[in-house]
Amino acid sequence: MEFAVLGPLRVYGPDGPVHLSAKQRAVLATLLMHPRVVVSTERLIAAVWDDPPRSAVANLQTYLSQLRHALRGTSLRLRTESSGYVCELPPGQLDLLAFEEAVRRARKAREAGERQAAERAYGEAVALWQGNPAEDARLGGVMAARIAELEEQLVLARSEWIDVRLELGRDDLVAELRTVVAAHPLRERSWAQLMLALHRSGRRSEALDAFREARTLLAGELGIEPGPELAELHAALLAGDPALSVRPGAPAFLGPSCQLPADTSDFVGRRAELEVLLTAARARRDQGSPPIVVVSGLPGVGKTTLTVHAAHRLRADYPDGQVFLRLGRDAAGPRRPADLLSELLRSLGVDGTLIPEHLEERARLLRQRVADLAVLIVLDDAQDETQVRHLLPGTARCCVLVTSRSRLPVLEGATRLPLDLPGEDDARQLLERIAGGARLGAAPDAELDILRACGMLPLAIRVAGARLAIRPAWPVREFAGRLADRRLDELVVGGLDVRGTFGGSYAALPEPAMRAFRLIGLADLGSIAEWSAAALLGCSALEADVALETLVAAGMLDSREIDEAGQPRYRLHDLLRVYAEERALAEDSPEEQRAALGRHVLECLRRIRAATSDLPIPTAPPYPLEEPGRAGPPVEGAGIGWLAAERRTLVHSVSAAIELGLVAEAAELAHHLSAYLNLEGFLDDVERTQRAVIAAALDERTALRAELLLAGVPLSRGAFGAAGAHFSRLHDGFERIGDRHGAAYALINRAACHHGAGLLHEALDDAHRAIRLLEELGDAGGLDYSWTWPIWIHMERGQYAEARRLCQDRLAVAGDDRRVRGDLLRALGTACYLSGEAAEAVRYYQESLLISEVIGHRVATGKVLRRLGEALGALGRFDEAVDALDGARSLFRESGDGLGEALATYALGEVRLRQGRAKEALALLAGAYERLGPDGPPVWRARVLRELGRAHAGVGERERAEAVWREALRLFEHGPEAAQVTAYLAGRA
């Protein structure tokens, strides 16, 4: 039905609900309350405005024009007449017309003596009312008379409906009639109906009380006595007139029975969940409603097993009977509530010939049957709230346990128990109970492989255990191997079939959700965010969200995780992923599969370009920027948090691109991704992705540039010799193929290796050669990176003024590049600190820290916190220094940066020395030296040893201090820091 006005105004178009403005709703509501009738312009204006503006006619015409446009695609036609407007609708598309037609049918059936048909038609008519007419439309006072007229039609129809049901002997009308007389206390007909219903329910004294109440009310309000109908009925009740009685409506409850399936003898685990379920089921609610518990989870997780086990434990709490009803689906879809009620009523002992035809009548009969009984009702495999709602008792003595793949979020008053996978110990215990503990204990590795292949899913474990139990001589290792290779093909035995269980749930999905399920499985991602689903489906984010939430509601997808970027993440169980991939390969053509995966790769590339724009550049020639107009819509929320959340997806997309033959896209993805992976210390991922690109590369240039990024891994790990040799080979390769850009990056990376190895002259030479090439090529990003090495080398040489000059020169050309400015400010602060200007250094460090925190660079933040702590310690601001250094150590530890953590620990040891706490400093510095290891940067090993010697001297270990200083002097070789150590040895400092 497209239009509803008997309650809130509702309009449904081809694409769902149609949203209208307040004035449009007022115009439409007025027309719908006068269907197929000319409504004058004056009346429409009065309906919309109590005090019309001078532009009312023009405004009205505008609203009507907007309505014609908004209602395009619906069956409503707005026709203009000379005196006003008419809305024309076909039968069945407006609830008011349907109400009038149903009342006509009911009256005709009643006149013909067809009371059951009349009862159904009246029930249909009354059910169409959802509130007061157009109750959410702002209508003028002129509409009050029409609204009152419609409400009077409802009152009359309901009264006639009650008469028919009284004639049929229905005895469950008392509660409804009390509501009616409360709403219309001066209607004598309603009081008469209530008195008759009470009498026929065996409540004669209450019927007489009702007459006295009506008489008092009529006298007090109107000053009159009850009319003939009430007076005659009162006299008949006093006389006990047998004509007032009719045949009984239904038999009494037949007595307690247990219809639960057998409990599971090998039930294990679920102690916490069982306790929650039993506690909720034994609750007696003050408001009088029955306890309802919804046990939800993915197919095969053990919802029914747990619920039946709990139901057997609850039998003594509900001694009047325990009923089990499978809801589920049939060939036409979810089983109809009316059919389920019929089955439930029969199970409660109601004669099938006395079960009413109308859904609401059946629901009322159920509530009547169990109103004063303690009955437990188990509803298994509910599809949605609509299926359950009519099956609920009305009193607190009963209890309902529901199992469903959905949490049934809009089922009122329910306790929800989402069922997760069991832990490994419970899963192992279940498998051993079925297949034999001794047998599995002899092959614990194979047992664990079976559990993992089953994804800890209880149904799969039960099937696997049964298969082993059937064949006692079958080697467990052999079955584990077959299960790993064939998964769902092996998980079937007797009537248990994991694939079949999944298939039933899959078949119940709407087509968009089916397709989403298939493509998520095909993509083989551990978890996905909404944007990934939208890319796979080739649809909008909103459409993807609807499909994902449908899968969550169906228990086919888990959504209990929010990632670092604040995105909900959706995860398929391992076996569901296998099944989803099967369905994709069976139902989607190779072209459709390739298109979906290709869309996802390209969306990953588009997003990673935006997400890495603020990160330190990869140490390889950059890719050209997207041409204006081809970059697609702006990417929202792409940054460090997004990269952290999507790292596994992005790493996977590199191999996916290669499998699709998109090698150039894979190379660019791996290039941009390396910026984040290096920053956060995911060096194994850098290695994996770059090796994949090298193996797939179609030309030497692509392979060599990927090798540049691969060679950066040993550089990041401090293996400067091996990395330097690799960059030398790469430089020769780039020279051979004429790639000057690649050669420049090989040089600057080799400079970094020389610097780390303490070869400062060679490092400076390579850096300046690289800078000259990059200036010729116009690579601004490469220049920013390359100039950092001369700056730091000059500082290593004690040439602090030159380092400061270079920092200031580079800051002058850095522009708005926050990353570059942050790095240069940190370097400038270091130059100031080494020049003895600690206060000036703190100022630069704080500015650098603000930038790194704003753009979310955790590693850069850790580096500047280390330097800041060092400077604060020099100023005697020890508490602030310790806070900064603790923050740095934490950040380095989280990112797996062992060198960074060692240097922050060294700085903290320096602070403790400044405080005179030599013993604490000794422990910290010894830990820092151990963390650096024998392959750590020589200059930093020397610095740590220098301070370690001071700590030994501070605790009175002069001999040990001199030994440490001699090793530091050997590593320093020359320069101002070597002179400082020489002074320590000579006792001059």
Image: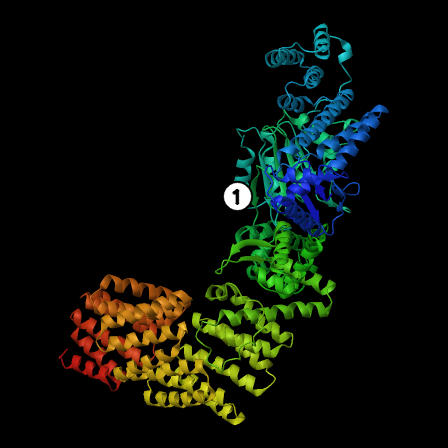
Q: What x and y, as percent, mark residue 225?
A: 66, 9
Relative vertical location of residue 352 with respect to residue 812 in this rendering, above or below: above
Q: Determine the residue positioned at 54% across, 69% down.
A: 607
Q: What x and y, as percent, mark residue 494?
A: 73, 51
* Residue farthest to the front, as pictured: 54
Instruction: Specify whether residue 567 is in view.
Output: yes
Q: Determine the residue positioned at 62% across, 58% down.
A: 544
Q: What x and y, as percent, mark residue 856?
A: 42, 66
Instruction: Specify whether residue 4 is in view.
Output: no
Relative vertical location of residue 544 with respect to residue 179 in this rendering, above or below: below
Quadrant in which residue 205 is drawn: top right
- Which residue bears the numbered disc 1? 271
Look at the image and name its color scheme. Answer: rainbow
Q: What SS does tag 1 mark?
A: helix
* Residue farthest to the right, as pictured: 112
* Left or right: 895 in relation to 354: left
* Quarter occupied by the N terminus: top right
* Residue farthest to the bottom, as pictured: 736
Q: How many labels does the image show?
A: 1
Q: What x and y, as percent, mark residue 526?
A: 57, 62
Relative vertical location of residue 212 with respect to residue 561 in this rendering, above or below: above
Relative vertical location of residue 13 with respect to residue 155 in this rendering, above or below: below
Quadrant in which residue 954 is drawn: bottom left
* Residue farthest to the top, as pictured: 239
- Neighbours of disc 1 within 10 Å: few (<14), some (14-19), many (20+): few
* Left or right: 361 in relation to 407: right
> In the image shown, does 557 or 190 lie closer to the viewer?
190
* Quarter occupied by the C terminus: bottom left
Q: Determine the residue positioned at 18% across, 83% down.
A: 982
Quadrant in which residue 344 is drawn: top right
Q: Which amino acid does label 1 sit on?
A: Arg
